[in-house]
Amino acid sequence: MGTITTTVPKAMANSLWDTRIISCYGCSAQAFLLVFYLSAEFYLLTVMAYDRYVAICKPLHYGTIMTSRTCVNMAVATWGSTFLYAVLHTANTFSIPLCQGNAVDQFFCEIPEILKLSCSDAYLREVGLLVVSACLASGCFVFLVLSYVQIFRVVLRIPSEQGRHKAFSTCLPHLAVVSLMVSTGIFCYLKTPSMSSSSLNLLLAVLYSVVPPAVNPLIYSMRNQELKNAGWKLITEGFSKR
């Protein structure tokens, strides 16, 4: 919700009013919130992979490993580190002098597009930070993949076909969303200028900033049986009142 509400409402309003105007403060706030929410989502998805690894590979130790205190500590570490990370990115980006106009070729204030407006070598600091960020994201992704390798090794040994189907149906959508988010995000932020085009930039931005948070409720919440029952009850009551 946070990721989508950072970019989509403003883009829709600009489209309806046939304008592309956004204030400098609004642009910096948008860049900060987008980095903050996307980073938090990615780290939380990584934590979820570890949680599922413990639940499937070490079920008897789950209660002692994933205690309430452990979960709180991981959540605090995720939100705290992503807040500092977003502050660093935003402050570094908007401290760079811009001399090539103020028109960003994107439907939101995306950091790579802002850097294109710079005429100073100072933008290399932010490029270096983006490279470090990509390395950290790749490290988390490798950890996530290794967790799923262990998970799938255990799942394939489950004798029950229903048990294997349940485990795969739970894990594969999670892995698909993470893969889409990481691959498109890293490619968007690290691609060379020769590979850049307006249509490609727009497609990549939608794939990493809009699609994953949009499908998350469908993948996770709607798989919950209690939510399914509540949604079905709400629909049937609506039709009965008519």
Image (cartoon, helix red, strand yellow):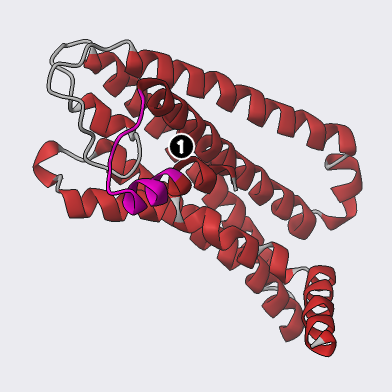
Horizontal and vertical percent for residue 87? 50, 18
Q: Is residue 226 left or right of residue 82?
A: right
- Front position in the image: 65 or 215: 215
Q: Tell whether 105 sits left or right of 66.
A: left
Callout 1 crowding tier (Cα within 10 Å): few <14, some 14–19, many ≥20: many
Rendered residue at 57%/27% (across/down): 82
Visible residue check, residue 169:
yes
Q: Nearer the viewer, residue 79 or 103?
A: 103
Viewport quadrant of the C terminus: bottom right
Looking at the image, can residue 183 be seen?
no
Where is residue 45? Give x, y as percent. Answer: 61, 47
Residue denoted by label 1: 137
Residue 56, image x and y in percent?
76, 60
Residue 168 pos. (x, y %): 64, 72
Based on the picture, tell me whether residue 151 belongs to the magenta stretch: no
> In this picture, is 219 found above or below 93?
below
- Mark 1 is on which residue type? Ala
For image coordinates 40% across by 48% down, the residue present is: 13
Side (left or right) of 99 relative to 90: left
Residue under the image location 57 percent in, 66 percent down: 173
Q: Residue at x 23, y 16 (%)?
A: 124
Q: Secondary structure at mark 1?
A: helix
Span colored in magenta: 10-23
As drawn, 61 above or below 28: below
